[in-house]
Amino acid sequence: MKVYEYGNTASRRVLIQMVDDHDLEFIENEVKAIGERTQKDFRLIAFQVHDWNRDLSPWKAPAVFGKEDFGEGAEKTLAEVVQYCQDAKKDYYIGGYSLAALFALWASYQTEIFKGVAAASPSIWFPGFVDYMKAHDIRSGRVYLSLGDKEEKTRNAVMATVGEKIREAHSWLESQGVRCTLEWNQGNHFKDADIRTAKAFAWVMNQ
């Protein structure tokens, strides 16, 4: 994976984000928006993912739009990411948007490295994911969740469950003593991804 870095490279707060080409077009705007929402300095490491559906999926699942099925490459992707998170003096936060946000949530069940999870509009409709959350222990103490208020209003039967699933996940995490918030944004899934992600990262750092 190609790696891009932003912010203060000496900061003890390190933000980890999986991105695609579209995210990279707006990443500098996102970094600016994070800075406007927190007094804390930070370093953001963005990992460019080439096969989104394969490299960020925790297990195989059938396609829900288009013809591309979901793979099971998340474990390999996380192993690469963890190599950048070895300094015990630093605080690491993982986050992202859409399937990258789902990957961030899943990663927080695999390792204790991440102090917080910034999951903006996560693909939490992913088959079996909320059941997975309930069957395993999360290892991060802070979780930010968000969704657009029109995201569950879709004709796609699987993706239409996203509102129900994110409410369920939020309630479950709170019941487990995790510091968790659920923010509703205006619009559908494709609106203001950079700003929504910035709000997510700022929240987990500010807690």
Image: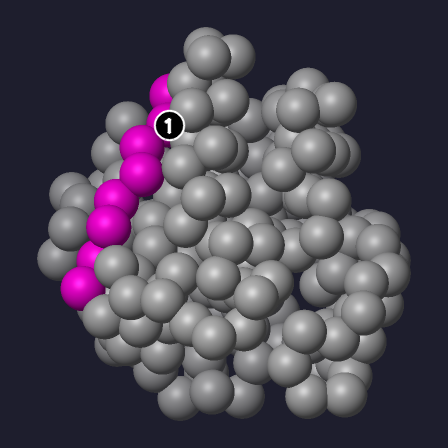
Is residue 63 inside the magenta stretch? no
Instruction: Name the quadrant of the C terminus.
Output: top left
Question: At numbered mark 1, what does the secondary structure look like: helix, strand or loop?
Answer: strand
- Check the image and report above or below for 135 versus 59: above
x, y (%) of residue 101? 53, 55
Other-residue count near label 1 (Cα within 10 Å), few / some / many at <14 / 14–19 / ≥20: many
- Check the image and report above or below for 43 versus 4: above
- Check the image and report above or below for 25 versus 2: below
- Residue 127 visible to the viewer: yes
> Which residue is at a point 36% across and 67% down the rendered structure image?
153
> Which residue is at a point 86% across and 61% down the rendered structure image?
60
> Which residue is at a point 55% across and 26% down the rendered structure image?
140
**The residue stretch that appears in magenta:** 179-186
x, y (%) of residue 48? 63, 77
> Which residue is at a point 24% across and 50% down the rendered structure image?
184
- Residue 101 visible to the viewer: no
Location of mark 1 (residue): 180
**Front-most of residues 112 and 127:** 127
x, y (%) of residue 128? 73, 44
x, y (%) of residue 46? 54, 68
Locate residue 74: give its quadrant: bottom right
**Front-most of residues 106 and 164:** 164
- Check the image and report above or below for 91 versus 49: above
Left or right: where 175 falls relative to 183: right
Instruction: Name the quadrant of the N terminus.
Output: bottom right
Left or right: where 92 falls relative to 63: left
Q: How is the image coloured?
A: one colour
Left or right: where 147 falls relative to 58: left
Amino acid type at mark 1: Cys
Magenta span dominant secondary structure: strand
